[in-house]
Amino acid sequence: MCCRTLASLRAARTSAREVAWLQAAETGEGIPAVRAGGRELPGLVLDLDATLITCHSEKEQAAPTYNGGFGFHPLVCFLANTGEAVSGRLPPGNCGADTAADHIAVLDDALAQIPAAHRHGTAILVRADSVGSAKAFPAHIRTLRGHGLDLRFSVGYAVTEPVRRAIRSLPEDL
């Protein structure tokens, strides 16, 4: 798909989302809150994560994945408040979505999909797995704060047995 077509689709989705969100506000429903750790999180929550889509095809860009299967490895951003997919990148299956550049591009596209009234003046939490901890990605989020966005970020990490041992060895008063 050419860049002009993608830009038109993005603009149409942004416009439709703005109307839908305005209608939700008029009915008193608004955008639902996200719950985590037994409490409601303020504002909007964007979740970035990659996933494997298994398929085998002789078609364009079908390639072996990093784990030896065949398919694609898209990086997608969902608005956790509503479950909406707001952006994504689809590299070939043998190309992991594990670069800060991919995360930055997907986040920037996602932020552009949020209506301006919600993007500015609303707390936005960006959540990613450990791949999102690459230095450039959190630095980019901090830079966006200087452009009037109230952004925070949370990077998760798999708690394996070696990590548990390391945590248990920490002093209790740390």
Image: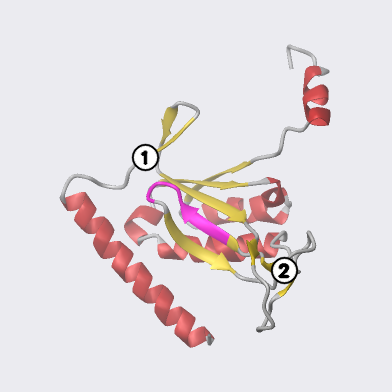
- Mark 2 Cα shell of 10 Å, populated few (<14), some (14-19), many (≥20): many
Image coordinates for residue 25, horizontal then vertical, percent: 22, 50
Q: Earlier in the sequence, mark 1 or mark 2?
A: 1
Residue type, numbered disc 1: Ala
Q: Nearer the viewer, residue 114 or 73?
A: 73
Mark number for residue 143? none
Q: Nearer the viewer, residue 111 or 139?
A: 111
Q: Residue 16, located in which quarter of the rendered image?
A: bottom left
- Whether the magenta-drawn stretch holds residue 77 is answered as yes
- Whether the magenta-drawn stretch holds residue 47 is answered as no
Q: Is residue 173 left or right of residue 32?
A: right
Q: Is residue 151 left or right of residue 139?
A: left
Which region of the structure is painted magenta?
Answer: 76-82
Q: Residue 63, located in which quarter of the rendered image?
A: bottom right
Q: Nearer the viewer, residue 12 or 121?
A: 12
Mark number for residue 70? 2
Which label lies toward us, 1 or 2? Answer: 2
Q: Residue 120, located in which quarter of the rendered image?
A: bottom left
The residue positioned 26% from the left and 47% from the top of the image is: 30
- Mark 1 Cα shell of 10 Å, populated few (<14), some (14-19), many (≥20): some
Image coordinates for residue 101, horizontal then vertical, percent: 68, 64
Quarter occupied by the C terminus: top right
| 3D distance between C-alphas at marks 1 and 2 | 37 Å
Which residue in the protein does label 1 denote?
33
Q: Is residue 40 left or right of residue 55?
A: left
Vertical position of residue 173 compared to residue 41: above or below? above
Image coordinates for residue 7, horizontal then vertical, percent: 46, 80
Marks 2 and 1: in contact by CB < 8 Å?
A: no
Residue type, numbered disc 2: Phe
The residue positioned 78% from the left and 62% from the top of the image is: 66
Image coordinates for residue 75, horizontal then vertical, percent: 61, 61
